[in-house]
Every structure is written in structure tokens, then in C-alpha cells.
Image: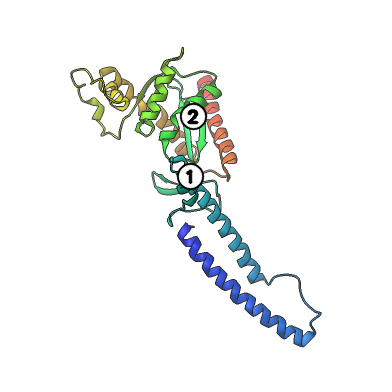
Amino acid sequence: MSYGRMKEKERQIRAEVGGLLAQAEAADAEEDAQHGAEQRGDELPAELQRRETRLRKIREAKRVLEERARQQAEQAGKPRAQVQQAKPADKHQYNFTDPESRLMKGGDGWVQGYNAQVAVEPSLQLIVGQRVTQVANDKEQLAPMVQAIEQQSSQRPAALLADSGYCSEKNLAYLVMTHQSAHQIDAYIGTAKQKHDAYCQPCPRGALPKQATRVERMQRKLQTAAGRAVYAARKTLVEPVFGQIKQARGFRQFLLRGLTKVRGEWALVCLTHNILKLHRLCYQ
């Protein structure tokens, strides 16, 4: 339900509650006259009770959306006064079935769900890092995924290959910091959505200007012969794993609700994928 619809529905239910209370008072007066004032029930009529319950849920949903709007304003660095006054837009939505899920755009349109991430090693297509987030944008997921690989596989990746959804100045700056450590990561990250042969064009001649951004430097890296060869392998690494999970094994939606349970479900899916890969390696 959208925030604008919540405000409209709240007004409607308040009016209905008022009408039902008036009817209840009239019924009480009639029953008192018929049976005596000492005879009264302690329970709300079923219709009124249902509306009161619905009204409480809508008010709680409004409170959650308003708090979310304040958090987003704070993260955007707005002044304290603007943070306290921040309100959600009327189109912002709340899901009563799974409040922790978010509205995200998928391959088949908009869905209510989560953003499932995996990192795959190139030799056997084993999943070496996985996580689930409520954030639809992948640009905030590069650093957390590197950390997930280190935690779940007990090693830092020597190289990293990702599509343009993970490209930003902030992410590339994070990789520069990792390059300064003892375990360097050789990263190849798409800089923008490209046509099929975009990185097949010859590398421009001449050195990059000193003031070139990190994104521009990454773009030049992908235009080199080595960069083109590495990036061309991207669709043969991670994309087949998602295809095997979603198409071959039919896992196209989470069965559980809530971020904690969904993370556990995704971890089991990834574990099953690895077991099947290792079984095929050992017995076929």
C-alpha cells in the first residue's frame, strides 16, 4: 500500500469507526431499554474490531515509512531540521505480507523482494561469497561482497570482475585502498551499460590526463587488449550460476519472509549449488 493510499484509507476507516460507534451506542440504548442497563457485553462488535485492527496496522506502516524517510534524509547529509521534517512521497509503499522486503525492478518488471548476491570463482563455478540485502542498487554492494568472500572463503580474491552495476568512484576508491595492502585485487569493472561490442573497439592512443577520474581510468583499462579479454569472460562466470539456480533447479522466489530467514534460505541454496558442483566433479 502506498503512503498516499494509507492516508486516504486511514480517513475512510476513521469515518467508518465513527459510524459504527454511533450504531453501537444506539443499539446499546435500545438493549438497555429492552433488557436493562445492567446487561452489557465486554467485546467489540466483529466489524468494529476488524477495522480497529486494520487501522492500527496502517498507522504502524505509516510510522515505518516516515522513519525510513528520515533515515534517508540523514544519510543524504541534509540538515537536522530537514531530517526531522522529512516525509515519504505518496507513491512510497509498504508491504504488509513481508515488511522487510522492498520494491525492486527485476527482469520481468517490478517485484517485491530482496537483492541476492553471489561471487563465483572461475574454475568450477563454485560460490565463494553470498549475501542478501534490502538495497536494490548494486553500487553499494562491492565492498560488502569482498568482505563476504574473505569471511566465507577465508581468503581475499586476487582478481575481481563485475558489471557496470557495481561501478562508482566510491567503489573504485575502495579497491585502490585494497591495492595498497599486501593482497592486491586486480579489478575489471564495467563503467556503463555497453553494447555487445563496446569493449571490442581499439584502445585510444595516448596517455590519460592526470585529472582523469577513477571511472575513466577503469574504462581505459577495459579497452586494452588484456582488459577486453578478461571482461569478455564475465557472462560465462556468474550468469550461468544464476541460470542453474533459477532455471535448472526452479528456485525463482523465496519461500520464507523476513530478512534473517531469507538470508538463511539463500545460504542453503548456495550451499546446495556447491555440493552439486563438487558431486559432479567427483563422480562424473
The amino acid sitting under disc 1 is Arg
Say which residue label 1 marks. Answer: 80
Horizontal side, residue 224 vs residue 50: left or right = left
Q: Which residue is mark 2?
A: 144
Left or right: 165 as drawn, with respect to 201: right
For the point 46% across and 53% down, which residue is it?
Answer: 88
**Marks 1 & 2, CB-CB < 8 Å contact:** no
Q: Amino acid at mark 2?
A: Pro
- Up/down of 150 relative to 36, above or below: above
Mark 2: secondary structure: helix
Q: Residue furthest bottom?
A: 34
* Quadrant in the picture for residue 227: top left
Badge 1: residue crowd in 10 Å (few <14, some 14–19, many ≥20): few
Among the 4 quarters of the image, the one containing residue 173: top left
Corner quadrant of residue 136: top left
- Residue 181 seen by the camera: yes
Disc nearest the viewer among 1 and 2? 1
- Residue located 59% across and 58% down the image: 57
How far, Cα to Cα, is label 1 from label 2?
28 Å
Label annotation for residue 4: none
Q: Position of residue 19 (x, y in %)?
A: 59, 76
Residue 143 at x, y = what percent?
46, 28
Q: Is residue 2 visible?
A: no
Is 114 drawn above or below residue 58 in the view shown? above
Give the residue furthest to the top: 182
